[in-house]
Image (cartoon, helix red, strand yellow):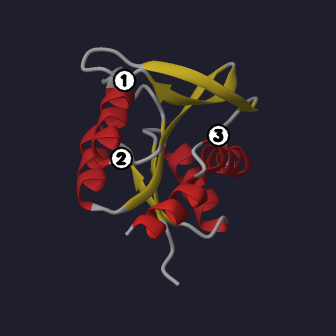
Amino acid sequence: MKKKKVLIVDDQLDNLISGMEAAKDLQFEPLGASSLKDAIEIIKKEDLYLVLTDMAMEGNKDAGIEIVKACYKKGIPVGVVTMRRVIRLFIPEGLSSDSLELIKIETIGEEEKDVNVWKKAFQRLEKEVNLEEGLATQKKTL
């Protein structure tokens, strides 16, 4: 059985590595990007199951928004993992051409984006968007 591809986007190398380890532990095929350019390329060419992204990247405070917009265009579920005092998972809602509203889903950690925090983020996002249920519905309608 082919593993589902997931993309982790974070400009901090240690966070990116722990995200990819978590994805692998959860039986996904992890792909990683540390820049907006690399993330957009992967989103355009790969068949992704879901994407988890940091919101701000060094030198580009709007990188997360661009990644979310690219995911929306392809219909890829996306979650935003932020680190401000505590680590939270958000999902986008109310996306328009000039704005993005993020809805807090869950606090998933306290100090760093370690493997366990990323696992919680993957599992919670998967539950939030009911991916398995959605895929089963798609198969029935084909």
**What whole-number distance in Å separates the C-alpha atoms at marks 1 and 2?**
13 Å
Check contact, mark 1 vs mark 2: CB within 8 A. no
48 shown above or below 130: below
Q: Residue furthest bottom?
A: 1
**Tag count in the figure?**
3
Amino acid, disc 1: Leu
Query: Does dot 1 land on a helix, a strand or a loop?
Result: loop
Identify residue for label 1.
Answer: 95
Identify residue for label 3.
Answer: 113
Residue drawn at x 60%, y 52% as measured from the top left: 18
Q: Quadrant of residue 71?
A: top left
Amino acid, disc 3: Lys
Query: Does dot 2 land on a helix, a strand or a loop?
Result: loop
Residue drawn at x 66%, y 48% as measured from the top left: 127
Q: Which one is earlier in the sequence, the residue at label 1 or at label 2?
A: 2
| Residue 78: x %, y % from top left | 47, 41
Marker disc for residue 110: none
Is disc 2 surrounded by few (<14), some (14 to 19) or many (20+) residues within 10 Å? few
Q: Dividing the image into 4 quarters, which one contains the C terminus? A: bottom left
Q: Quadrant of residue 113?
A: top right
Residue drawn at x 30%, y 62% as measured from the top left: 46
Is disc 3 surrounded by few (<14), some (14 to 19) or many (20+) residues within 10 Å? many
| Residue 11: x %, y % from top left | 42, 38
Q: Which one is earlier in the sequence, the residue at label 2 or at label 3?
A: 2
Amino acid, disc 2: Gly
82 shown above or below 70: above
Q: Which one is earlier in the sequence, the residue at label 3 or at label 1?
A: 1
**What whole-number distance in Å separates the C-alpha atoms at marks 3 and 1?**
26 Å
Residue drawn at x 47%, y 28% as measured from the top left: 92
Identify residue for label 2.
Answer: 75
Task: Single out the mark in the foreground, 3 or 1.
Answer: 1
